[in-house]
Image (cartoon, coloured by chain):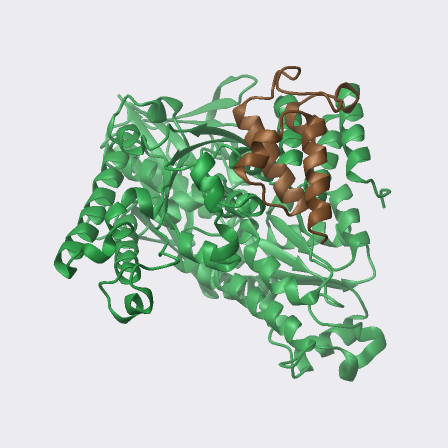
C-alpha cells in the first residue's frame, strides 16, 4: 500500500520509512494513506490515531491493534 | 484463458511489461488490477503508470476542472484510474477552496486558462446555502424563502457567467437535504422546511440548467441516498480535513462523476450484446427446458425480470440490444418468444447470434450487421471464460463483469456509465424500430435488378434545413458519435454549434431522411465556412444506416448549390483519415473534386463552382424550409 501511495518499490520500504525518508509523503499523501487504510480494513481512525501514523511501522501496528480490538 | 494473477503479481507484471516496452499488454493488466482491487492505493499505482503510458496508447484526452467547497484531492486519482479503464486520459484541474465564484466570473481565472472540456461544480449545501443549514429554526417562513431565492439567483448568475466565458460542459451538484433537520419531524410537514426549500432550490436549478446548452445537474441527494446517508458522511474527516465523504465512498463519488464524463467524451456503447443462459434467464435452456429455466415474477426468476426491465430501459434510451448465445437456435427462440415470464422478446433485439461459433466472431458480425464500430459494443455474460476471450480478442469492446449474484445484474447494467446519455433525441427513442425497418429494406434490396431501380423503389425524401433550436442537440450528438462516414471527425458540443450558427460565414445543415419503410430522423450534418470567395467544408458526416443510398450526394449537392448561390467560386474540403473513416475516403474524388494537396494529416480537395456542380440524385425528393434555397 505504501509502495503504491508513495511511488517507491516495495523493497525500498521498511517499518522505519517516514515523511523524512520518503519524498512523496506530504500532507495530501498522508490523508491518502489514512483513507486507504480505512477503506481497505473497514476502520475509522480518530484524529489522535492519525497523528500517531508517523512511520509505516507505526501505521501497521495501529491497524493490527484496531483489528484485534474489534474482530470483524 | 490467461492465468489468474493476484494483485501483487499483477503489479509486478505491469512493471515488467512497462520496462519491456509493451504498452498494450501493460494497459490490459492495469485495467484488470483496477477491476480486481479498486481503491485509493491502487489508484496511485494505476495513475502513475498511466502517466508513463499515455502517449503510447489510443486514449481519448479530456480536461476536467473541479470547482469545489470541500476536499476532492483524494478522489482525483480514483477518478483518473476509473477513466483509464474507459479509454480516457483525464487531466484534472482542481480549483482553490471555495474560490468557485471568483473562478467562474473572472474571465482570466485559472479555470479558463486551463481550457477545460468540462467543469464540475461540487459544492455543499452548507457552503452555498448556509442560512438553510445553520440557525434555520430562527428564520421566519418569509425570510427562509428569501434565502432560498438568493441561492437560486446565485446559480443563475454563475451559470450564465460561465456560459459567457466558456463553451465547456458544466455539471452542477444539486443540494443535499439535511440528514437531521433542525425541527425534527416537523420539517417534513411543510414546504418551507429545510427539506422543502432544498428541494425547491434543486427544482429551480434544474430549470436553469435546462435553459442553457450543455449544463447538467448531478442529483447528489439521490447519490447519497443510494449508499445510505449514515455511511456516506464522515463528520470527523469533515472537521479535520474538510473531506465530508467516508473513505469507502470516495470511489462512488468518482463513479458518479464518470457517468457524466463517459458520455461527454463520447465513449458510450450503442449496443449491449447479452448472453442468454444464466444471464438473461436462470438455467440452461438446452438442458433445463422451458419448464426448468428461471424467469418470472417470483424469486429467483425475479432477478432476471429485473435485469430485463433494465434492458428495456436501455432500448428506450436508443441503445440497441443483441443476443449472443451458444445454443440451438430453436431452443433459444422458443424461450425468447414463448416463455410466459420473459419481458424481453426476440423483436427487442436488433441482432441475434445463436450458434456454436466463438463469441468474438459473433460480436464482430453483430457490429457489421448494425453498422457500428466494435468500440460501440458492450458485452454482458455470466461466464468469465467468454468475457476473457472477448477482452483478449477485442479490447475495444466494453466487457461488463456481472457479480456472482443475479440479484445484482440489473443494478450493474443500470450503473454502467457507457449507457448514460445526457440528452435524448426522438431518433434515440425510435432506434430499435428503425433497425427493424432496416432489416425489411435489406430484404427488398436483394430483389432488384439495378441499384437505380432500388433507389427509385425506396422513394427517399431528404429534408435539408439550417440547424435550429429543435435540431441542435441531435446535430451536436451526430458530430460526437459518427465515426465511419465522417470526413473530418471534428467533435462539437451543443454550445459550440450554437455559437457557430450565430456567424453568417458559417452554414450548418442537417439532413433528415424518410423512405417507404419509415423515418430515419436526422442522419447527417454538413458544416461549411465561407472564406472570401471560397467555401470550406468543415464537417461532413452521415450516419452509417443511410450510407450508399446517394443521400451523401444529395447533401453535398445541396451545400455546393447554396455556396454557389452565396457567390462562392470554390468548394474545398478535407479528408482527415482516422482508424474508422475508410468508408468516406473516396468521397471527394467520386464527386469529381480535384486533389489540391496531400500530407501526413490528410488530403485537401477542391471543386470549381463556376464550371462544375454536384448533380442532385434524381430519385431523392428534396424538401427545404419554405422560402429557403428554392
In the image, B152: left or right of B348? Answer: left
Q: Is residue B137 above or below residue B55?
A: below
Percent position (x, y) of residue B449? 60, 58
Q: Residue B122: percent from the left, percent from the top?
A: 39, 41
Is B33 situated left or right of B544 in this image? right
Q: Can residue B318 be seen from the camera position used here?
A: no
Height in image: B257 above or below B347? above
Give the total of numbered labels.
0
Residue B94: image quadrant is top left
Point out residue B16 in the picture as x, y percentages from the top left corner.
Answer: 80, 24
Q: Chain A, which colour?
A: brown
Colour green maps to chain:
B
Identify the residue shown where x is 85% and y is 42%: B2
Residue B231: tell me if it is visible.
Answer: yes
Picture quadrant where residue B556 is located: top left
Please name the residue shown 52% across and 27% down the image: B576
Camera-nearest residue between B531 and B273: B273
Which is more toward the observer, B374 or B458? B374
Point out residue B616 in the picture as x, y percentages from the top left corner.
Answer: 39, 45
Judge from the rendering whether residue B281 lies leftward or rightward of residue B535; answer left or right: right
B144 sits to left or right of B8: left
Instruction: Give the vertical position of B159 relative to A12 (above or below).
Output: below
Camera-side residue: B437 or B180?
B180
At 57% from the left edge and 28% from the top edge, which residue is drawn? A30
Amino acid at each position: 500500500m505504501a509502495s503504491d501511495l508513495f511511488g517507491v518499490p516495495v523493497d525500498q520500504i521498511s517499518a522505519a520509512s517516514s515523511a523524512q525518508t520518503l519524498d512523496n509523503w506530504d500532507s495530501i499523501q498522508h490523508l491518502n494513506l489514512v483513507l486507504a487504510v480505512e477503506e481497505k480494513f473497514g476502520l475509522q481512525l480518530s484524529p489522535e490515531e492519525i497523528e500517531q501514523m508517523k512511520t509505516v511501522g507505526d501505521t501497521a501496528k495501529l491497524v493490527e491493534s484496531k483489528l484485534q480490538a474489534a474482530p470483524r | 484463458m490467461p492465468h489468474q494473477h493476484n494483485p501483487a503479481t499483477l503489479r509486478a507484471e505491469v512493471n515488467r511489461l512497462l520496462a519491456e516496452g509493451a504498452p498494450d499488454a501493460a494497459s490490459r493488466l492495469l485495467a484488470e488490477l483496477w477491476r480486481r482491487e479498486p481503491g485509493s492505493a491502487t489508484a496511485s499505482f494505476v495513475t502513475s503508470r498511466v502517466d508513463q503510458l499515455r502517449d503510447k496508447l489510443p486514449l481519448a484526452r479530456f480536461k476536467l476542472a473541479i470547482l469545489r467547497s470541500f476536499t476532492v484531492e483524494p478522489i482525483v486519482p480514483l477518478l483518473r484510474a476509473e477513466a483509464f479503464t474507459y479509454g480516457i486520459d483525464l487531466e484534472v484541474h482542481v480549483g482553490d477552496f471555495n474560490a468557485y465564484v471568483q473562478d467562474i466570473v473572472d474571465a482570466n481565472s485559472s479555470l479558463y486558462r486551463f481550457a477545460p472540456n468540462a467543469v464540475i461544480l461540487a459544492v455543499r449545501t452548507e457552503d452555498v446555502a448556509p442560512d438553510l443549514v445553520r440557525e434555520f429554526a430562527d428564520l421566519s417562513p418569509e425570510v427562509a424563502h428569501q434565502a432560498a431565492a438568493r441561492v437560486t439567483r446565485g446559480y443563475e448568475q454563475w451559470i450564465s457567467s460561465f456560459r459567457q466565458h466558456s463553451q465547456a460542459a458544466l455539471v452542477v451538484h444539486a443540494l443535499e437535504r439535511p440528514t437531521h433537520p433542525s425541527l425534527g419531524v416537523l420539517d417534513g410537514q411543510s414546504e418551507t422546511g429545510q427539506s422543502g426549500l432544498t428541494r425547491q432550490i434543486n427544482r429551480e436549478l434544474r430549470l436553469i440548467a435546462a435553459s442553457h446548452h450543455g449544463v447538467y445537474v448531478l442529483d447528489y441527494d439521490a447519490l447519497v441516498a443510494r449508499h445510505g446517508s449514515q455511511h456516506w458522511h464522515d463528520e470527523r474527516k469533515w472537521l479535520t480535513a474538510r473531506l465530508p465523504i467516508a473513505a469507502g465512498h470516495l470511489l462512488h463519488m468518482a463513479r458518479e462523476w464518470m457517468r457524466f464524463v463517459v458520455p461527454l467524451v463520447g465513449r458510450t456503447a450503442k449496443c449491449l450484446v447479452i448472453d442468454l443462459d444464466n444471464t438473461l434467464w436462470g438455467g440452461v435452456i438446452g438442458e433445463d427446458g422451458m419448464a426448468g429455466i428461471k424467469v418470472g415474477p417470483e424469486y429467483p426468476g425475479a432477478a432476471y425480470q429485473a435485469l430485463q426491465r433494465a434492458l428495456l430501459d436501455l432500448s428506450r434510451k436508443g441503445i440497441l440490444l443483441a443476443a449472443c448465445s451458444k445454443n440451438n437456435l430453436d431452443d433459444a427462440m422458443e424461450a425468447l418468444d414463448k416463455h410466459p415470464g420473459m419481458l424481453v422478446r426476440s423483436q427487442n433485439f436488433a441482432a441475434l447470434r445463436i450458434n456454436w461459433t466463438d463469441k468474438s466472431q459473433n460480436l464482430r458480425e453483430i457490429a457489421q450487421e448494425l453498422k457500428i464500430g466494435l468500440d460501440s459494443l458492450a458485452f454482458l455474460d455470466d461466464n468469465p471464460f467468454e468475457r476473457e476471450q472477448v477482452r483478449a480478442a477485442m479490447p475495444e469492446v466494453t466487457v461488463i463483469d456481472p457479480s456472482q449474484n443475479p440479484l445484482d445484474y440489473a443494478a450493474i447494467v443500470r450503473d454502467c456509465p457507457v449507457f448514460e446519455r445526457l440528452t435524448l433525441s426522438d431518433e434515440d427513442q425510435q432506434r430499435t424500430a428503425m433497425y427493424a425497418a432496416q432489416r425489411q429494406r435489406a430484404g427488398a434490396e436483394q430483389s432488384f435488378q439495378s441499384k437505380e431501380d432500388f433507389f427509385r423503389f425506396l422513394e427517399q425524401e431528404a429534408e435539408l434545413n439550417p440547424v435550429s433550436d429543435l435540431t441542435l442537440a441531435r446535430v451536436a450528438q451526430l458530430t460526437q458519435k459518427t465515426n465511419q462516414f465522417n470526413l473530418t471527425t471534428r467533435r462539437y458540443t451543443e454550445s459550440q454549434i450554437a455559437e457557430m450558427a450565430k456567424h453568417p460565414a458559417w452554414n450548418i445543415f442537417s439532413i433528415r431522411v424518410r423512405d417507404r419503410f419509415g423515418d430515419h430522423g436526422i442522419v447527417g450534418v454538413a458544416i461549411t465556412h465561407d472564406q472570401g470567395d471560397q467555401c470550406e467544408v468543415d464537417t461532413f458526416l452521415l450516419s452509417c444506416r443511410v450510407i450508399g443510398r446517394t443521400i451523401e450526394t444529395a447533401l453535398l449537392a445541396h451545400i455546393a448549390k447554396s455556396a454557389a448561390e452565396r457567390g462562392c467560386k470554390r468548394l474545398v474540403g478535407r479528408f482527415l483519415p482516422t482508424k474508422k473513416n475508410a468508408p468516406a475516403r473516396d468521397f471527394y474524388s467520386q464527386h469529381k473534386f480535384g486533389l489540391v494537396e496531400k500530407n501526413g494529416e490528410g488530403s485537401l480537395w477542391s471543386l470549381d463552382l463556376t464550371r462544375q456542380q454536384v448533380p442532385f440524385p434524381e430519385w431523392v425528393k428534396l424538401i427545404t424550409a419554405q422560402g429557403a434555397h428554392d
